[in-house]
Image: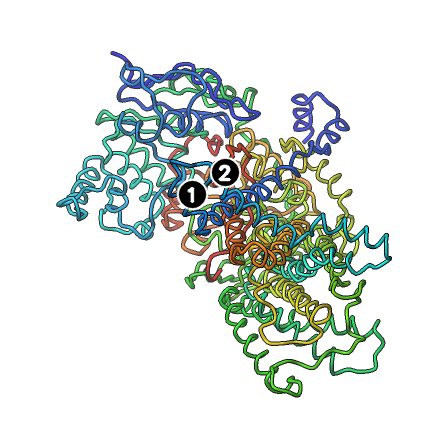
Amino acid sequence: MAPVLELRGITKAFPGVLANDHIDLTLEEGEILALLGENGAGKTTLMNILYGLYQPDAGEIFVRGKKVEIHEPNDAIRLGIGMVHQHFMLVPVFTVTENVMLGVESMRYGLFLDRRRAAAKVREISEQYKLEVNPDDYIKDLPVGVQQRVEIIKVLYRKADILILDEPTAVLTPQEVEELFKIIRSLREQGKSIIFITHKLKEVMAIADRITVLRQGRAVGTTTPAEATMERLAQMMVGREVELVVKKKPAKPGDVVLDVENLHVVDHRGNVAVRGVTFDVRAGEILGVAGVQGNGQTELVRALTGLLRPEMGRIRVNGVDVTHASPREILEQGVAHVPEDRQKDGLILKYPVHDNLILNTYYIPPFAKGVNLQFGEIYKAAAERAYEFDIRTPNVYVPVSTLSGGNQQKTIVAREFSRPVRLLIASQPTRGLDVGSIEYIHQRIVQKRDEGAAVLLVSPELDEILALSDRIAVMYRGQFVAILPAAEATRQKLGLLMAGVSVAEAEAAGQAPAPVEENPAL
Amino acid sequence: MSEQKERASQNNPDTRAQALARLLLRPARGSVWQAILLPVLAVFTALVIGALVIVFTDLQVLNLYKDFFSAPGKALAASWKSIASAYSALFKGSIGNPAEFAKAISVLRATGDAAPLRQAFWPISESLVTSVPYIFAGLAVALGFQCGLFNIGAEGQIFIGALASVYVGYSIKGLPQYIHLPLAFLTGAAAAGLWAAVAGVLKAKTGAHEVINTIMMNYIAFLLSDWLLNGPMKRPGYSPISPAIQDSAWLPKFFPDPLRFHAGFFVALGIAAVVYWLLFKTTIGFEIRSVGANPDAARYAGISVTRNFVLAMFLSGALAGMAGANEVLGVNHQLASAFSSGYGFDSIALALLGKSHPVGVVLAALLFGTLRSGATRMQSLAGVPIDIISILQALVIIFIAAPAIIRWLYRLRLEREVGETVFTRGWGQ
């Protein structure tokens, strides 16, 4: 039988880049095919071609053995191809049903929306695939994981049997990822064929039937999880050997740099997000803060960096009370901050690379003399940073928005690490990055520690916490429920603590054999 | 970290020095041409559509179209004539009539009488005089845009600047010009700056949107000026006009009447240069632009967003105030109610056309000034209503605001500009 989908020799060039270079790909009925590749490898371009958003320069597409032309998404939908985009296309103030109906409204008397019939259909799909979505909920009230399921329902409602999921786990918590995997397996059992786009090796090993790896616009190979190892996949993806385990020496903790006492923080909606947190971080150690996203980590970091005013408690950096200090006063204490949302907080996207590299030092010599910016110095320093931190950019004058996510993050890291750093606060420093960039940034963080900086690492990725931390704090509902040495922490124990299980219970459960530790943030 | 470097050098066989040189190499600049291509095409397209409007509003020409199929030449010729006469009148009214120049020069040669030459230069002098308040007000709105602020209050700020300048101009007597003139000019700027800063403070402290506040403050400014000109600042007599300013507060004129061209033009160019320097070469401008481009990142970088809102509104208001001061000190030498005729509102469009860049603003202001002053002549010579200029301006703005139309029309494959001008942010942010 012919494969359900076959791409032959797909080629697509953009000015200056060959995004897809004669790519061949087959998808069998009822299988999960993982499309693995670094950012910029051409995964999304290929899928956009399949979905009719781009036209290929060359190549052919076959659906169930028949050659087809896909000029626009409606063609794709007619052929049973559905796409769940990385960024959801939902109307927040509409209900689930209304969002699903949008564009394919069922009508009564050709005039009135037939919400009831659509809602029944949504409920039926939800039950069939165990999606657990209530048709009458408003999108704005739903967590991200459920919103994603609404996107899946949208695709199924349009009778798709080939589903493309574009980086579906990028926005999900570990628990939500598990739920998504269950849903994907249940879709497969009912005969759907799925293309799963990702750059995360661990996910590929967990979910895929077959894996096709893309590198620099070319399909470099197809394999299966049984035949491949993570190391082998990483090598195929990056084109060189990658160290999946961060090498680090034991920590040599020095003086206390960050000292936090009984900190209470209220978020912008007026909810108490941090309730009485007390901890310290010493020079030369990494304190990892683990926890499911939304348990107060964001507010904790914002309070520490002066972006949110604490309600109560005290923060000291190098012995100086900075509880109510401005962001600049805190920066000037030698605090470097790699923010959680790099595009919102960390960069000015339309500014050139060189201006982003001086975003918080523009007023200090040699970059300014009085009020005059010294562009000669600014350019020179930018070129040195770009070279030293391996920021891949044609020159320092292009807008930072034109760089890939990994290089944008390296720009932030270059800026923050090039100041005299006594305390480094890194919030999800590798979110959305590819293997090569993650390896690089992890090495840099450990290097900063070894140079004597205190490091506070906040990440919802357990594996990142386990790979880097010397001590680990678990944050749950605004509190640190435990602070333990990394040696005593296992994935299982942390997972239980993160879910709100008490320390004693977690200790008891922690006796069970721990899974092999690798760095699956990769 | 030496591994890292080794790897980088493996990937890039060039040495450190070569790599740095490559990173510092400026790409060939095609961007200047690209940057002005869209505005130029927008203006051109507006003129073409304006021509159609001229034809379709000319009843005599329209009548000829009834017989279009029997005598198409007649209708087309009449259309062409109508368009040509309108646009040539616009040209003569704003730049000047070449024939008149030639004649005036021969008169000057023959008799030594310069009056005809001055007459010939009159249109271009008027265009420049009209451009000056546009330059100031356009800079005002552009500076606001650079900080992410939508200052709709330039019109009101022009009135405040004019009121303050005229007061200093007529009430203080016996000062030498080199003190009195700058004092009157800067008082106007400062007063309007403080006036506009109120909206900045309200936004910084309470989050109240500057669009609402500057609109409301426009009304306060208009009515304040009406009241002052009908009361405390009224000159003896019936009409609501202020006393004339002292000669020592006049912006110097260079030529005898009827040429009104005055030093304000050079002041405006100088101020445009200062604004350019401030925005792009100083830490102050770096902060203002950072807040405008991404307030979250600015705050993260230790820049005070609220302080920059207040500062930018002050500077924006001060620039608008200079437009008012210029009109009082350079053109009218007194203040009558309703003197501004919408410079402040046109300047919003003008700042968009100039892409919120001082150089662009100056060019756009020259265009607007030329169109405005030529319009009167077009009406009297070609009988084309003055409103056609408003239509042209509106079309230019539409095409600038929706560049996709121009790209589509001319099949341009321009790369999308990164972060096309941020006009303003959502409510209450």
Is residue B299 something one can see in this rendering?
no
* Residue drawn at point x = 41 percent, y = 19 percent: A212
Q: Is residue B63 left or right of residue A65?
A: right
The image shows residue A393, relative to residue A337, as above or below, that is above
Circle 1: residue type: Leu
Q: Can you give x and y, in whole percent of width and height, for residue A89 in the image?
A: 36, 42
What's the chain of the residue with tag 1? A
**Helix or strand or loop: what does disc 1 sit on?**
helix
- Contact flag, marks 2 and 1 (Cβ < 8 Å): yes
* Label 1 crowd bin: few (<14), some (14–19), many (20+), radius 10 Å: many
- Towards the viewer: B325 or B289: B325
Circle 2: residue type: Leu
Q: Is residue B194 left or right of residue B411?
A: right
- Towards the viewer: B34 or A233: B34
* Residue drawn at point x = 23 percent, y = 24 percent: A191
**Helix or strand or loop: what does disc 2 sit on?**
helix
In three-dimensional space, the C-alpha distance between marks 2 and 1, rounded to whole angstroms, equals 10 Å
Residue carrying label 1: A494
The image shows residue B216, relative to residue A104, as above or below, that is below
* Residue drawn at point x = 13 percent, y = 45 percent: A109
* Label 2 crowd bin: few (<14), some (14–19), many (20+), radius 10 Å: many
Color scheme of the displayed model: rainbow
Q: Can you give x and y, in whole percent of width and height, for residue A55 in the image?
A: 42, 24
- Towards the viewer: A78 or A361: A78
The image shows residue B196, relative to residue B288, as above or below, that is below
Q: Can you give x and y, in whole percent of width and height, for residue A303 in the image?
A: 54, 58
* Residue drawn at point x = 78 percent, y = 48 percent: A366
Q: Residue furthest top?
A: A1
Between discs 2 and 1, the one toward the N terminus? 2
Residue carrying label 2: A466
Q: Quadrant of the N terminus of chain A?
A: top left
What's the chain of the residue with tag 2? A
